[in-house]
Amino acid sequence: MRKLVLLLLAHSLFMTGCSTMQAGGAEMTGLSLLNDRRGRDAILVDEAIEDRASVKLNAYHDLRDNCHFNITAYNGAVLVTGETPKEEFHDRIIEIVRVIPNVKGVYDKLTLDDPSPLNFRATDTLITGKVKTALTQIPGFDASWVKVVTEQRTVYLMGLVHRNEGAAAIEAAQHQADVKQIITVFEYLD
């Protein structure tokens, strides 16, 4: 089955020049699917985790209206980032995420604070873009091996990597302007 999916994606790339596939509301390009070290099923499970968390958390008006949270899943590991003004909100967010099917572990990086202003989040988006671009410049490294999340100028790197690849990704991120800190959530292959 996997060979058939890869063959169809490769064919689609050659026929159209670019291929995308909807997966749980997120878009994956054919090349990222081919190069990602997670299997297709793991990618789809991660997308389902993110979607379920978003739906469940946003169903609570008090959480949605008073908190800023991001849920990022990679190979079943879930990174929760953002800000919440109350410990009660924090605990509820983490508990909701923890019981979502297929979650292997939760990395709680949610801070007790008022939600960050939009201009801070725009800076975080720019930093994420710079780090992703820097990853593409590493010789022999495929940027699809690492997910990049930035929250309050702290860069989180998630992925399935060898130790030398993780070190190269960290070094690339360190050289980007405005990065305050780098936290890794790597699953090492060696």
Image: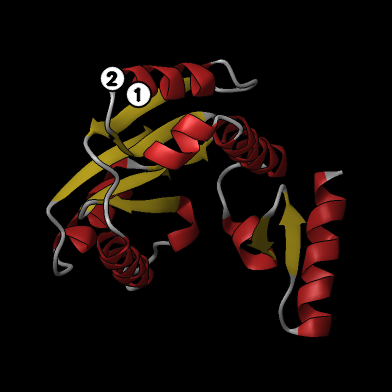
Find the distance from the CA under tag 1 to the CA under tag 2: 5 Å
Q: Position of residue 22 (x, y in %)?
A: 75, 58
- Residue 67 visible, this angle: no
Mark 2 lies on a secondary structure that is helix
Q: Name the residue under label 2.
A: 87
Look at the image and tell me in which quarter the N terminus lies.
top right
Q: Position of residue 15 (x, y in %)?
A: 84, 82
Asked if marks 1 and 2 touch (Cβ < 8 Å), the reply is yes
Say what amino acid the circle numbered 1 marks. His
Question: Which residue is more in the foreground, 82 or 161?
Answer: 82
Question: Which residue is more in the foreground, 41 or 34?
Answer: 41
Which mark is drawn over residue 66?
none
Q: Mark 1 points at which residue?
A: 90
Which residue: 28% across, 55% down? 169
Q: Position of residue 65 (x, y in %)?
A: 45, 41
Say what amino acid the circle numbered 2 marks. Glu
Which residue: 60% across, 21% down? 100
Q: In this view, does 25 lie above or below 44?
A: below
Badge 2: few (under 14), some or many (20 or more) residues near its Cα, within 10 Å? few
Q: Is residue 169 above or below residue 76?
A: below
